Image: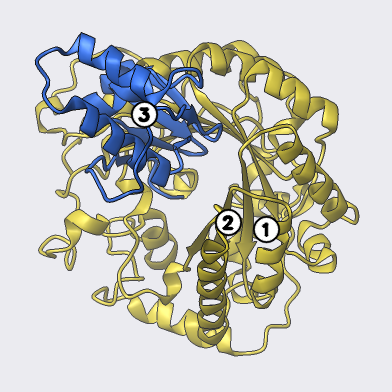
Chain colours: A yellow, B blue
Amino acid sequence: MSNSGSPCNGQPSQAPSLNSVPTHGQPLWLLAELTYKCPLQCPYCANPVDFASKTGELSTAEWIDVFTQARELGAAQLGFSGGEPLVRQDLIELIREARNLGYYSNLITSGVGLNERKIADFREAGLDHIQVSFQAADPEVNNLLAGSEKAFKQKLAMAREVKAQGYPMVLNFVTHRHNIDQIDRIIELCVELKADYVELATCQYYGWAYENRNDLLPTRAQLERAERITNDYRDRLAAEGNPIKIIFVTPDYYEERPKGCMNGWGQVFLTVTPDGTALPCHSARMLPIEFPSVREQSIEQIWNRSNGFNHFRGYEWMKEPCASCDEKEKDFGGCRCQAFMMTGDANNADPVCSKSPHHDLILQAREEAELPSHKEPVYRNERNSKVFCKS
Amino acid sequence: MSSPTHSANTTPNTAAEISPESVPVLNRMFRFQWEKAQDSYVLLYPEGMVKLNGPAGEVLALVDGQRTAADIIQTLQAKFPDAEGIDRDILDFLGDAREQLWITL
């Protein structure tokens, strides 16, 4: 590891290892997880499974300070996320400040808690874009997965309103074995709602989704069918002159090489959690690494000099087969969280890679996907989270 | 999440001819601004950013929904009197920008 200096504890110090710190980019993307509170209970939520133990949300002033500092370092995109960011009563104030600072701001919401008035007020305050996430095109599956009766109708109404008020709109469908066979209906719904971008993002298996993986991972046949249908729609819509952009994200469990996770550790993304912990990606909290807090260190210290952000920068930390691999600059050994979750060692190659000695874990998950799934997923709620806090 | 940045491809292409009388308008999907940290103009859109090269930034900075392509050429010709063939380059770029859906004409 290139940075073996002790944690800095908020004291500005000359890090002895500074010269050996690998080069890195600017934190162009700031993801502000404003709260872990959420009215939905999606079983594939990326929040930590023990979120119920995290308390003490950053105040309005603390968030504005984070935005200001990150902007100085080059952040241009700001995502308001959560939990459900609409739960924060000061959201409009944060939006206004983001605009004053020159951010392009994105509200990433379930749409639950949104209304016509708020959409207009946010626009006036300078919000650039609203992304509404859907669980499926079918109300029944949507409601089953979101754990809410009224969610689907509300999402539809809000998506229409977002578009009517002139925002660019991205619709996000998290796909998995229960809804991927409805991909045609999902695409048709997006076309009807006049989405500008559609993300058909196959569930990533972190947080709650990892707990529920066997009930979420589609079979290879399901996946291939969905991709084929998506390509057909793309061609047809393009031929009709429809500018809609459809992005299909394959689950890495069906790849032979890992994804270049987050464009490299600490290269582009900076996530700040509700309690002010700064992370190189929104899943990294699970790793046995001490991550800095914006309450104790400046964003500049965190991004450029903290042990947490320098941990997997460069290639020196790599073990075999990554260290000598000619593809390491392309995929950076894959996802550190996935390596840790599945092998117990975050320095290992991502098991998605067929060169990994742990690749059989992925093959096993694929095989299990072929079995009929019957278990009820664990819903992401306060009660279930407390179970994880204890264990 | 897709990559938030990619470089603008401003290579002239064979896009349909742009009339000098046409008025380019920025697609409201994009926000155009000077980005100090990039030392360049950029286009920002949902979860992404296009970093514009110098000439592309100069042209888009003049796209305001009022000026015609001819106005833009005239302004930039006055600003860069030594640049040759600037009118062709600007029209090619506007064609490319339309292809990318950055502007409508």
Q: Amino acid at mark 2?
A: Asn
> In the image, A87: left or right of A252?
right
Q: Secondary structure at mark 1?
A: helix
- Looking at the figure, which quarter contains the C terminus of chain A? bottom right
Residue B69, relative to residue A385: is it above or below? above
Q: Which of the two discs, 1 and 3, sits closer to the camera?
A: 3
Residue in the image at 90% along x and 52% along y: A150
Q: Is residue A203 visible?
A: no
Residue A82 position by quadrant: top right
Q: Position of residue B54 (x, y in %)?
A: 22, 24
> In the image, A67: left or right of A374?
left
Instruction: Tell me the tag on residue B20.
Output: 3
Disc 2 target residue? A242
Q: CA distance from mark 3 to mark 2?
A: 27 Å
Answer whether labels 3 and 2 touch (C-beta < 8 Å): no
Q: Position of residue A295 (x, y in %)?
A: 49, 18
First along the sequence among labels 1 and 2 = 1
Q: Amino acid at mark 1?
A: Val
Q: Which of the two discs, 3 and 2, sits closer to the camera?
A: 3
Answer whether labels 1 and 2 touch (C-beta < 8 Å): yes
